[in-house]
Amino acid sequence: MTTLVPGTKVVIKEKIMINIGVLASGRGTNLQAIIEAIEEGKIEGRISIVISDNPDAYALKRAKQYNIDTRYINFKEFKNREDYDKEIIKTLKEKKIDLVVLAGYMRILSPYFIRTYKNKIINIHPALLPSFPGLHVQKKAIDHGVKISGCTVHFVDEGVDSGPIILQKAVEVKDDDTEELLAERILKEEHQIYPRAIQLFSEGRLIIKGRRIFIK
Ligand code: GRF
């Protein structure tokens, strides 16, 4: 038992839990890594919703296994990208989302979405940006002959994979690499740096100065 001397100031460090919204279209291994980091107490936050444009995304199943709310939104029911994004934003607002995490989300966000959540949307990309933006980048890295590739967590801006870089991890490209082998080794590192970047965000430690991000 602690005996307090009268007049002693007791400072209780209050933890602020951020609400995370995840957008995913596929298998969701990054989602899984984030869920596990939260369960291990590494991230001061909770995933309040997982939204997908694909009803069969395994990411939705993973979320359900952890009793995380999910929502499938069918793109075909909307007349354009902005209307679709407005529906997503409606759900994110209802859930009071502080951070939008793209985890294998295969749609380009509208400028409206990006403006609404400025500096609050992050993405992971399986190459060392600004090299190899876009799709099939592990193959592009091998075909180009680079000796080092890797992965990048970045804020999302209106360009393709062009936003300010938060964290990167290098992965060696081996002489006998196939697209699959390289992708697998990069993915392992993605599972480390994505939760770490979210942890830093949740702790308010990311300082944005123009294109550069400093870690407090
Ligand atoms: C990852 O390679 C990520 O870098 C890219 O999409 C893939 C998603 O994989 N943006 P998963 O669905 O998280 O397993």
Image (tube, rainbow, N blue to C red):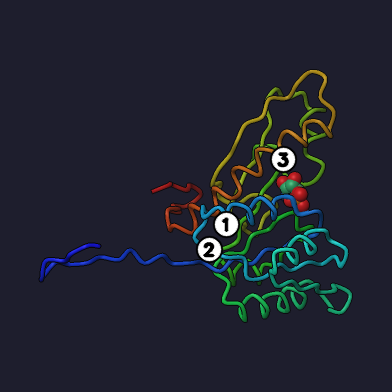
Q: Which residue is mark 1?
A: 38
Q: Which residue is mark 2?
A: 45
Q: Earlier in the sequence, mark 3 or mark 2?
A: 2
Q: Are marks 2 and 1 in contact (CB under 8 Å)?
A: yes
Q: How would you rate the neighbour count of disc 1 (Cα within 10 Å): few for under 14, some for 14-19, many for 20 or more?
A: some
Rendering quarter of residue 171:
top right
The response on whether ligand 1 sits within 8 Å of label 3 is: yes
Is residue 118 positioned above or below 165 on the image? below
Q: Which amino acid type corresponds to the residue marked 1 in the rendered image?
A: Ile
Q: Earlier in the sequence, mark 2 or mark 1?
A: 1
Residue 187 numbered mark, or none: 3
Is residue 116 positioned above or below 157 on the image? below
- Compute the Cα span from label 2 to label 1: 7 Å
Q: In the image, residue 153 lies at what x, y percent?
A: 61, 47
Q: How would you rate the neighbour count of disc 2 (Cα within 10 Å): few for under 14, some for 14-19, many for 20 or more?
A: many
Is residue 158 positioned above or below 115 on the image? above
What kind of element bears circle 1? Answer: helix
- Which residue: 77% across, 36% down? 184
- Which residue: 75% across, 63% down? 65
Q: Which amino acid type corresponds to the residue marked 2 in the rendered image?
A: Gly
Q: Please, which residue is most extreme toward the left here? A: 6
What kind of element bears circle 3? Answer: helix
